[in-house]
Image: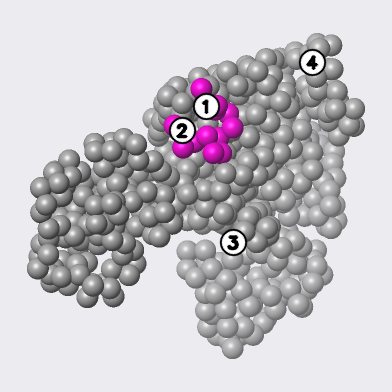
Amino acid sequence: MLIDESYVALIRREGANAYPEECCGFLLGAFDGDDGVRVTWVVPVANQRQGERRRRYLIPPEAFLEAETEAAEAGLAVVGFYHSHPDHPSVPSEFDREHAWPWYRYVIVPVSSGQAGRPQSWRLDPDRARFIEEEIITTHAAQDVASGDLQETARE
Amino acid sequence: MSNVTIRIPTALRGATGGTASVEVAADTVGAALEEAVVIHPALRAHLYDEAGALRNFVHPYLNQESVRRQQGADTPVSDGDLVTIVPSIAGGVAEAPVAHAHGSETAAVDLSSEEIHRYSRHVIMPEVGMEGQRKLKRARVLMIGAGGLGSPLGLYLAAAGVGKLGIVDFDIVDASNLQRQLLHGTDDVGRLKLDSARDRIGQVNPYVEVETYETRLTSENALELIADYDLVVDGTDNFPTRYLVNDACVLTGKPNVYGSIFRFEGQVSVFGAPGGPCYRCLFAAPPPAGLVPSCAEGGVLGVLPGIIGSMQALEAIKLILGKGRSLAGRLLLFDALELEWRELNVHKDPACPVCGEHPTITELIDYEEFCGVPQARQAEEEAVGNVPEITPTELKSRVDRGDRVTIVDVREPHEWDIVNLGAFGARLIPLGSIVERMNELDTADDIVLQCRSGARSTKALHQLRAAGFGRLTNLKGGILAWADEVDPSLPKY
């Protein structure tokens, strides 16, 4: 996965700000060839899980549809999602596995006592048996992190 | 059948060989999806769980609307409709076997040589071992109720070495509890159940910290009480508290080991476990208030709470150890007369108002109101208020004066065997047959209706009144009040 360092910093900041609850958001971008993916836009959304937000997050289907539409208008696709694991390592849980589809990238940022660590990126194996880690390669293209209208829409 | 198009989301096109849409003929959205899975079998695992239910994060949309807001999988389709499959995105941290309350997971817990000796039959099993025994010692379990289910729960959880037991109860030990509530002894009659429970648990295992809460569990205190514990064992005997315990556990993310008993039957399950269903997924609404009698009204076989409460203790210990297959998602039904266990699968309901995907209950509500208790109480008061009553003392003096009074006992024959007013001319006509046997009574007589506590006789009075009887009176407080006021030598039950 190619992603700008400023987006990695944004994901870590979101994780630290949401602590002790979980944060979550969309990864928008494009696919490179068969296996590669480039993330060019990171959109935080409110964790809409009612209760248990310290260990669960939820992005409802309506928010997904909106993100997909807005991404398409920008010539991008939803390529994955990120969320934080407060006081837990950045390894997908069984609950993560049960709620995942293959193909998408699931980026998890560990937050320990309010300090966010380096995120890891995961893909679900097509047979649903396990997650496979994918290397995160950061770039320094200094993209504008402000995500504008989409962020406002998705937060509603 | 209608011809519809199913749009395959990009993420799942690996399972369709890259195909973006599938044309199928079907009557409903559910059937259309099944057709798509027949054409592209690799889709199945991503859309349906092992039990064959649509995965809870998979939302079919018919044209622009989620079918979860329509008739679900049964939503009918028409020619030219477009079905899209939209995920909700969910996840979260890995579950420790039990999410320990703040601080407890890092607290250093060690076992003394006395404790290792005490728990040696645990620690020699690799499934428990020293680590499992330390988990038990770190665990904090909140017991709701110190009665029939609370007795085996308290005794076994304490004996097993659970570090902290909280007990919520406000009741006094009554002699009628002793037939099944082994936490309390004959000498404890009249004491607070909390006090005798604390003493008894201290005898069983002095290494257990016991915290008692002399209060009714309410919407005001439940979240705060539960917050300090890792899991809850529910030994309550009424529906409002059961729903309250369920909702409070779901909202705080604590597993709830549920048990209930009635006469010869029991139920056990684990609710509110991560990813598992809750009590509301199983029973969305309570039965009408007053329909299901409590143990006090309906009776309970003494051994039954011992069996069900022991099963709850077992499930609690398994959850703490993180071993075995828990009862989450399964409801065990026990029939003591047939000696039969049955097992039902309980599915998490995506539409559950408290643990579903779009919960409407996000804080504790008024559970008495939810269960219709105030309405039932009011109806009962109205029924009683409309009934002429006589006290046992007044009835005794009328009989002694030689007044001609017909006392009709509307209880069951086995209750008549326990105690009766036959010596005062009472006759037995059970409530269930009062209407068909009313020809045995004379409308010209003064009739006093009597039962155990006065409730059933009120119902009988209304039925006879509707049939044209005019000279009807209810014995206030039933034969229990008679024993209190007139003849203390009579047994009470």
Q: B39 or B404, which lies in front?
A: B404
Tell me how far mark 1 sits from mark 4, CA to CA: 30 Å
| Chain of the residue displaying label 4 | B
Tell me how far mark 4 sits from mark 3, CA to CA: 52 Å
Which residues fall within the magenta stretch?
Answer: B174-187
Q: What residue sits right under mark 4 in the picture? A: B115
Q: B250 or B256, which lies in front?
A: B256
Q: What residue sits right under mark 2 in the picture? A: B175
| Amino acid type for the residue under numbered disc 2 | Ala
Tag in front: 4 or 3: 4
As for residue B362 lying within the magenta part, the answer is: no
N-term mark: 4 or 3: 3
| Amino acid type for the residue under numbered disc 3 | His
Residue B9 is drawn in which quadrant?
Answer: bottom right
Task: Say if mark 3 contacts mark 2, CB within 8 Å.
Answer: no
Tag in front: 3 or 2: 2
Describe the element under mark 3 as helix, strand or loop: strand
| Chain of the residue displaying label 1 | B
Do badges 2 and 1 share one subunit? yes
Placement of the C terminus of chain B among the 4 image quadrants: top left
Q: What residue sits right under mark 1 in the picture? A: B186
| Chain of the residue displaying label 2 | B
Above or below, B380 against B368 in this view is below
Q: Which disc is residue B59 wearing?
A: 3
> Residue B11, can we see it?
yes
Q: Position of residue B26 (x, y in %)?
A: 62, 83
Tell me how far mark 3 sits from mark 1, CA to CA: 59 Å
Task: Say if mark 4 contacts mark 2, CB within 8 Å.
Answer: no
N-term mark: 3 or 2: 3
Q: Residues within 10 Å of mark 2 (few under 14, many from 20)?
A: some
Above or below, B313 against B70 in this view is above
Residue B87 is drawn in which quadrant?
Answer: bottom right
